[in-house]
Amino acid sequence: MFTARVPSLVPNRWAQMLVAFPPRFDLTVSNPTLVGLPYPPDLLAPLAHPRGLVYHPAPAGLASARQAVAALYQAQGLSVRPEQVLLTASTSESYSLLAKLLCEPGEGFLVPQPSYPLFEHLLRADGCRAVPYQLPEEAGFRLDTSRIPYHEGAKALVVVQPNNPTGTVVPSEEWEALVKLCRDRSWALVADEVFWEFPLGAKARQSFAGNPHCLTFVLGGLSKLLGLPQLKVGWMVVSGPQDLAAEAFARLEFLADTYLSVATPTQQALPEILARGLGVREAIRQRLRVNLELLREELQDFPFLELVEPEGGWSAVVRFPQVVSEEDLVCELLQERGVAVYPGFFFDFPHEGFLVVSLLVLPEHLRLGLQAVGQALAAKLPRP
Ligand SMILES: Cc1ncc(COP(=O)(O)O)c(C=O)c1O
């Protein structure tokens, strides 16, 4: 009776254990609203303004909201006009609109691996496929254009910068080659930059927003930018060769018009919320910096654990010696020590031996959780 767009719903072993053994220290929390960040209590007051009592359907978004989003990019020196911005109800919805725009059933997007596990489900739900390309481990999980394979039926190439969970960005020496590859192969470039405003390194980086050289969609949203996933506001910045970008935008607008999913009061309040929310963004940055420093310190006590240095984002990857499988380790940590961490295989790392932790969690939880991870592994290592 049902389509294969919905995968098996049987929870995996770890997810089942999460219910049986609720963790004391949950190092997987990536919901910013649950980690004690200082949100001003009246941050969402602009939503209650009486102007929201009148409905203004606007498929690409209200002009004032698009202007406010364009201004975010302009403030970074990027050439983005409000007319290039299309509002969506989330980055997930942006992906869904892009799949509808670019893919016939069975076609797909090239997606990085390791990366965000939702790609496969998002694309499958639209009758499309996620075709993985590797971020090579020997290059620190950074994109290497020369190793991106040709794939029949691929319509777009997705890059995530900073990537979830490795925190890597597209290396500067790859930018030109990547754009050329997309142009030569008639792939759209989809740059998921939801974590862009959370850099953790000092390396040069470049947003693809406004890139005129190939059809480009840059994705962003409030869920990460201001730590407000509940507002359901995302966007796409559409650019490229002029006629192609204009055609893509008009077609996206048509698709968006069939749903009109971004609430009018939210759009009206967006400029004000963006201005009021900067303090939250700063608090998130501060939390990430504190936690990354703490992680480095804690790992000194466990020299067999190695941090994969992130250049940005909300997560960190730790390599551990393969004396136990990822699944056995994360289940044992839950059951025996009350600590939740993600196994690397959730993110399709090329082999076993990785754990992923959120850098958003309370620092005290991170410290105690990491100590538990270190102690659990130390007990398994062969004695010298
Ligand atoms: C790389 C990446 N893109 C998109 C999203 C989801 O964003 P949204 O809440 O706007 O759908 C996430 C959430 O974790 C993510 O990691």
Image (cartoon, rainbow, N blue to C red):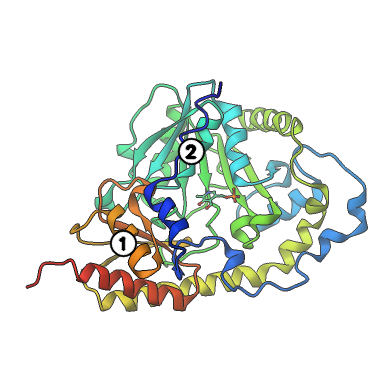
Could you tell me which secondary element the residue under label 2 belongs to? loop
The residue wearing badge 2 is 9
Say whether residue 136 is left or right of residue 368: left
Which residue sits at x=47%, y=52%? 161
Disc 2/disc 1 C-alpha distance (Å): 23 Å
Q: In the rendered view of the protein, which quadrant contains the C terminus? A: bottom left
Mark 2: few, some, or many residues within 10 Å (few <14, many ≥20)?
A: few
Q: Is residue 103 visible?
A: yes
The residue wearing badge 1 is 332
Looking at the picture, tell me which residue is in the foreground, 109 or 298: 298
Which residue sits at x=38%, y=36%? 132
Q: Which amino acid does label 2 sit on?
A: Leu
Residue farthest to the front, as pictured: 20
Residue 380 sits in quarter: bottom left
Percent from the top left, x then y, of residue 335?
36, 63
Q: In the rendered view of the protein, which quadrant contains the N terminus? A: top right
Q: Earlier in the sequence, mark 2 or mark 1?
A: 2
Residue farthest to the left, as pictured: 384
